[in-house]
Image (cartoon, grey):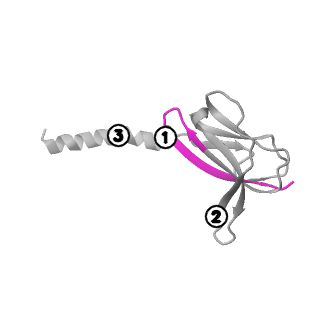
């Protein structure tokens, strides 16, 4: 094989090794309770998030912020943090939970998450909850 052929072959091998790793979802949010972007009338003690992969809880974080929606762009901007921290759980888990204060005011909240999955990929995401007691 020529050098050009070898490098083409190596590129092809690299691509086939690399492609499955990007087509498989990493630690992505599969479900939350209450459901993402929903409106709730009853305040749960905690918001529970389920992920598509096991995550390292010590290197993962979920926070809840009061939020404002920009009237023109519709963009949701986080304000002050209001949660009571993440609940205790196993070091490696597919579920994380963040506590809510009992006296949470009605309004729009932004839940931000960032996780480190066991395959060492970092992923982040966010969703809203609207509390209308
Ligand atoms: Cu991954």
Does residue 117 show up magenta in the picture? Answer: yes
Q: Residue at x 23, y 40 (%)?
A: 9
Alpha carbons under labels 2 and 3: distance apart? 38 Å
- Check whether the beta carbons of the residues at disc 3 and disc 1 lie within 8 A of each other: no
Seen in the picture, residue 9 relative to 125 is either above or below; the reply is: above
Q: Earlier in the sequence, mark 1 or mark 2?
A: 1
Residue 59: x and y in percent read 57, 36
Give the total of numbered labels: 3
Looking at the image, can residue 65 be seen? yes
Q: Examine the rendering and report whether any part of residue 25 can be seen.
A: no
Look at discs 1 and 2 and give the one toward the viewer: 2
Position of residue 72 in the picture relative to residue 44 (left or right): left
Where does the C terminus fall, quadrant-wise? bottom right
Residue 3 in which image quadrant:
top left
The overriding secondary structure of the stretch rendered in magenta is strand
**Helix, strand or loop status at disc 1:** loop
Instruction: Name the residue: 62% across, 45% down.
Output: 113
Q: Position of residue 30 (x, y in %)?
A: 63, 42
At a point 33% along the width and 42% down the height, the residue shown is: 15
Element type at mark 3: helix
Look at mark 1 in the image and give the residue it sits on.
24
Judge whether residue 106 is colored magenta.
Answer: no
Q: Position of residue 45 (x, y in %)?
A: 80, 40
The residue depicted at 66 percent of the width and 60 percent of the height is 77
| The CB of the residue at mark 1 lies under 8 Å from ligand 1 | yes
Q: Which residues are magenta?
A: 114-133
Give the residue pinned by disc 3.
Answer: 16
List the residue tagged with mark 2: 75
Alpha carbons under labels 1 and 2: distance apart? 29 Å
> Whole-percent x and y of residue 91?
61, 28
């Amino acid at each position: 094989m020529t050098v050009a052929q070898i490098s083409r072959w190596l590129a092809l091998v690299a691509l086939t090794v690399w492609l499955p790793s990007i087509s498989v979802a990493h630690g992505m949010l599969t479900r939350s309770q209450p459901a993402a972007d929903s409106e709730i009338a009853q305040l749960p003690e905690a918001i529970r998030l389920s992920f598509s992969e096991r995550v390292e809880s010590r290197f993962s974080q979920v926070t809840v912020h009061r939020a404002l929606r920009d009237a023109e762009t519709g963009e949701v901007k986080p304000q002050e943090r209001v949660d009571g921290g993440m609940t205790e759980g196993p070091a490696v888990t597919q579920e994380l939970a963040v506590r809510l204060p009992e006296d949470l005011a009605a309004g729009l909240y932004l839940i931000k998450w960032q996780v480190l999955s066991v395959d060492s990929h970092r992923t982040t995401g966010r969703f809203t909850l609207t509390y209308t007691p």
